[in-house]
Amino acid sequence: MTVFAADSRFVREVRSAANHDERRDGRQPDILLLHYTGMESTEEACRRLCAVESGVSCHYVVLEDGGVLQLVPETLRAWHAGLSSWEDETDVNSRSIGVEIANPGHEFGYPDFPEAQLESVIELCRDICARRSIQPQRVLAHSDVAPRRKDDPGEKFPWARLASCGVGHWTGPTRIDHAGASLREGDEGDPVEELQTLLSLYGYGLEIHGRYDAALTAVVRAFQRHFRPARVDGVADFSTADTLRNLLRSLPDR
């Protein structure tokens, strides 16, 4: 059992999670990965994140009342991302710090995130990003790195508010035009290949082959949850594509 001091001044309590190991190849975290706990009971979720038999863990949990628990030291590799990828990196755990936000998630009603909790998430994330020099475009959702498996923290999570406080990348979505042209599952050709290329350039893991398949639908849905949450349907309408292009244009050296 690891015994350690809190890395962040915002930590209320340190608990020791059983599942962790060394970051591989001497890597330092340059991704901040946000999750929701996705269980009916927050205390049950915390027990699971600490238990060896669960096979999972994280660095931090932010409770509904704003309290912050730390379960794994930031220097160690927590087991929170699972099968995932970003910018062709498949060992996301070695590159990231994982923050679980207490919320039962889509399976159990998906309530709004309480104000006290959001304030603590912002404070904690700002602290981590400052200490670790994590770039805004490297503040990601679990659904970004595992779009076919995960939905969290979901479309109710206020990414725009975080970005206004200096956490994460945001340009503001383009207005949805319900009558505009769009791409969807089953489409093929150069426009689909261009969409796949742009999503890949941003960091999403997918093959570029010009077919709008289930994998592309999942990635588009993940992108919408993060950057265009007004309608999450996996259909690449003008608003989705334009938001993506605006994000790419606003990246450093783009």
Image (cartoon, rainbow, N blue to C red):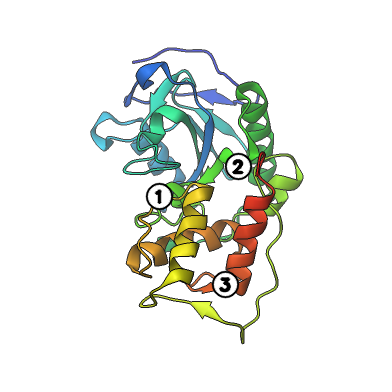
Tell me, yes or no, whether the two marked residues, 3 and 2, touch with CB atoms within 8 Å: no
The dot on residue 205 is: 1
Residue highlighted by disc 3: 231
The dot on residue 214 is: none
Q: Nearer the viewer, mark 3 or mark 2?
A: 2
Q: Amino acid at mark 2?
A: Gln
Instruction: Give left or right: position of 169 versus 34.
Output: right
Q: Amino acid at mark 3?
A: Arg
Residue at the image point whose x is 51% and y is 52% from the top: 153
| Residue 11 point in image, percent of width and height | 60, 25
Q: Quadrant of the C terminus?
A: top right
| Secondary structure category for the residue under label 1 | loop
Residue at the image point whose x is 35% and y is 69% from the top: 211
Q: How many neighbours does mark 1 have within 10 angstroms: few (below 14), some (14-19), or many (20 or more)?
A: many
In front: 195, or 150? Answer: 195
Residue at the image point whose x is 71% and y is 59% from the top: 172
Q: How many marks?
A: 3
Q: Amino acid at mark 1?
A: Gly
